[in-house]
Amino acid sequence: MKPSRAHDPDRIRRKRIEAGLNLPVLAEMADISKGHLSKIERGVLGTTPRVLKRLAQALNCEIADLMPPESTAAGSAA
């Protein structure tokens, strides 16, 4: 079974790097293990709204900033 893609692994990683945080520091700030965060960033694991909220708070951004862009999430509606 494929993991849920309610988040965009690349966006989470990019936001972390832009914030100047390494993986263990962000994991601690979001109260998750660094292994869990690593798997989220690599797209191996899906995540929950609660974890997304904690990541967004730690990264000082909106949850939507960690989600796929609407164009790819909605598919082609044209």
Image: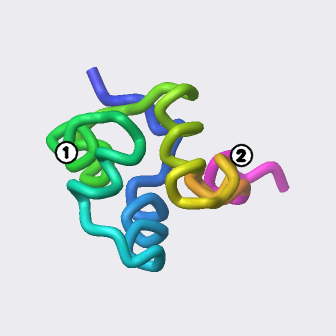
Can you say whether 16 is above or below 36 in the image? below
Q: Residue at the location (48% across, 26% down)?
A: 48
- 10 Å neighbourhood of mark 2: few (<14), some, or many (≥20)? few
Position in image of residue 17 (x %, y %): 38, 75
Q: Residue at the location (34% across, 69% down)?
A: 21
Determine the residue located farthest toward the top in the rendered image.
Answer: 1
Position in image of residue 4 (x %, y %): 43, 30
> In which quadrant of the rendered view does residue 1 lie?
top left
Say what secondary structure mark 2 lies in: helix
**Three-letter residue code for mark 1:** Lys
Region in magenta: 71-78
> In which quadrant of the rendered view does residue 26 lie?
bottom left
Say what secondary structure mark 1 lies in: helix
Position in image of residue 38 (x %, y %): 21, 49
**Earlier along the polypeptide chain: callout 2 or callout 1?**
1
Q: Which residue is mark 2?
A: 74
Q: Foreground: 30 or 51?
A: 30
Q: Foreground: 54 or 73?
A: 54
Q: Which residue is mark 1?
A: 34
**Three-letter residue code for mark 2:** Ala
Q: Foreground: 76 or 44?
A: 44
Determine the residue located farthest toward the left in the rendered image.
Answer: 35
The question of residue 72 being in magenta is answered with yes
- 10 Å neighbourhood of mark 1: few (<14), some, or many (≥20)? some
Q: Residue at the location (41% across, 42% down)?
A: 30
Q: Residue at the location (56% across, 54% down)?
A: 66
Callout in the foreground (2, 1): 1
